[in-house]
Amino acid sequence: AQSVTQPDIHITVSEGASLELRCNYSYGATPYLFWYVQSPGQGLQLLLKYFSGDTLVQGIKGFEAEFKRSQSSFNLRKPSVHWSDAAEYFCAVAAASGGSYIPTFGRGTSLIVHP
Amino acid sequence: EAQVTQNPRYLITVTGKKLTVTCSQNMNHEYMSWYRQDPGLGLRQIYYSMNVEVTDKGDVPEGYKVSRKEKRNFPLILESPSPNQTSLYFCASTTTSAKNIQYFGAGTRLSVL
């Protein structure tokens, strides 16, 4: 069965600083990987996804993530954080073929941005 | 517009009073699922459905029921709600042609008194 670990429950950064949110997954084959963002009081919005090919993927709002198969990781990064990035971030993994087509989500990382 | 619609958005009820949260998608997706979101616990899957008349338990199914009589609808039923089911609920749908990108409803905030 697939699983996702987001080791950081909360991350606090200053506005303008760089950001990295960690995500480790467990899955026996090639996965589909996702990052979703949930702004306060809102539903979940897809930030970016990895299906195949280039391991560095670009998403919306200036985010990027890098798939590292050897480390089973898919960390989310942003070079300069804005106050509006304060939100809950969820990493998710799904089967690329066979298995469950319903993604499994991590517990989320809450991003706090100080002015 | 492609969307997943949940109703109601907010609901306050009392222990033991049966309720249904509806979910409908207009994208002809095969797969639908229900999640609950609780502080510190992230998103936990309650039930999912791979197609019409095919449903299966997720990680936290106790106290919930679902049905999938039509492809577009996937209601969540609480036969006898209890206070520990106070939570934020999300319905989502996906399809293999969308490569499992989940489309989420706006959420239903349920309080059971």
Image (tube, coloured by chain):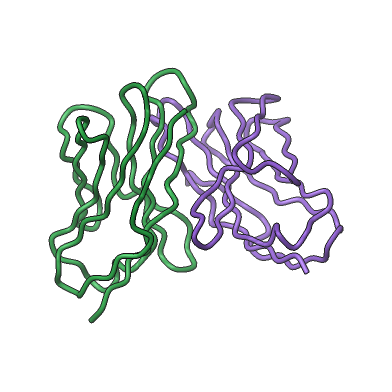
Residue A108 sits above or below residue B71 on the image: below
Residue nearer the viewer, A28 or B37: A28
* Furthest residue in direction bottom, as rendered: A115
Q: Could you say where residue A30 lies in the image, as x and y percent from the top left? A: 31, 24
Residue A72 sits above or below residue B85 on the image: above
Residue nearer the viewer, A41 or B7: A41
Residue nearer the viewer, B94 or B77: B77
Residue A22 sits above or below residue B66 on the image: below
Q: Which chain is purple?
A: B
Q: Could you say where residue B7 lies in the image, as x and y percent from the top left? A: 67, 55
Give the number of marks: 0
The quadrant in which the C terminus of chain A is found is: bottom left
Locate residue B91 relative to residue A91 in the image: left or right.
right
Q: Quadrant of residue A69?
A: top left
Q: Colour of chain A?
A: green
Q: Could you say where residue A104 lies in the image, as x and y percent from the top left? A: 46, 38
Q: Could you say where residue A95 lies in the image, as x and y percent from the top left? A: 40, 26
- For image coordinates 32% across by 37% down, the residue present is A33
Locate residue B102 relative to residue B7 in the image: left or right.
left
- For image coordinates 52% across by 38% down, the residue present is B93
Q: Quadrant of residue B16?
A: bottom right
Q: Quadrant of residue B61?
A: top right
Locate residue B46 relative to residue A9 in the image: left or right.
right
Locate residue A13 relative to residue B70 in the image: left or right.
left
